[in-house]
Image: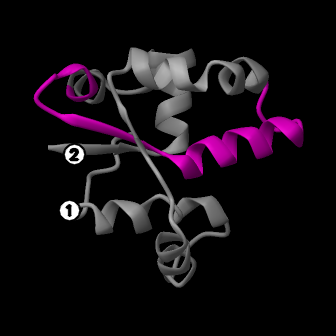
Amino acid sequence: MKLLLDTHAFVWRLTTPDRLSGDVNELIDDPAHQVLVSAASAWEIATKTRLGKLPGGDIIVAGFGAAISDLSADELPITAHHALSAGRYEVDHRDPFGSDARGPSRHRGGSPRHPR
């Protein structure tokens, strides 16, 4: 199964894994699953850190690559095609980052689950 960690799930896994359910942590730890972290999460984390909305964000930004590696996760890149697709999604919230990660995931083999 492919697991696309949204930004909250990624940050919580790094900083306070107990905020995720035991089932979600088990899914992330299961080597049978492909864990994905979108470039949109890197962008969101850096933006929220710059704006002062993510306490401790500097540490996450500095160690982003190592954190991906430690999770045995794969980076999910964003291409122009993905960005255009994500920008056209109808969303039910005001967070522009909320739909960004879904564009690339749909183009790489389906609709991954967003664990939380």
Q: Which residue is mark 2?
A: 2
User: Is 6 positioned to the left or the right of 54 in the image?
Assistant: left
| Residue 75 magenta | no
| Residue 35 magenta | yes
The quadrant holding residue 15 is: top right
Q: Are marks 1 and 2 in contact (CB under 8 Å)?
A: yes
The colour mode here is one colour
Front one among 114 and 82: 82
Residue at 20 percent across and 62 percent down: it is 109
SS category of the residue bearing label 1: loop
User: Is 23 positioned to the left or the right of 38 in the image?
Assistant: left
Number of dots carrying numbers: 2
Residue at 57 percent across and 45 percent down: it is 41
Front one among 17 and 80: 80
Where residue 8 appears, as percent x and y from the top left, is: 54, 38
- Amino acid type, mark 1: Gly
- Amino acid type, mark 2: Lys
Front one among 1 and 20: 1
Q: Which residue is mark 1?
A: 109
Task: Tell me where the magenta segment starts and ends, as one range.
Answer: 27-55
Q: Residues within 10 Å of mark 2 (few under 14, many from 20)?
A: some
Residue farthest along the right direction in this orientation: 51
In which quadrant will I find the N terminus? top left
Above or below — where is 110 with respect to 11? Answer: below
Where residue 62 appears, as percent x and y from the top left, is: 70, 21
Above or below — where is 12 with respect to 51? Answer: above
How far separated are the C-alphas under marks 1 and 2? 9 Å
Where residue 90 appears, as percent x and y from the top left, is: 50, 83
The quadrant holding residue 93 is: bottom right
The quadrant holding residue 46 is: top right
Residue at 67 percent across and 47 percent down: it is 43
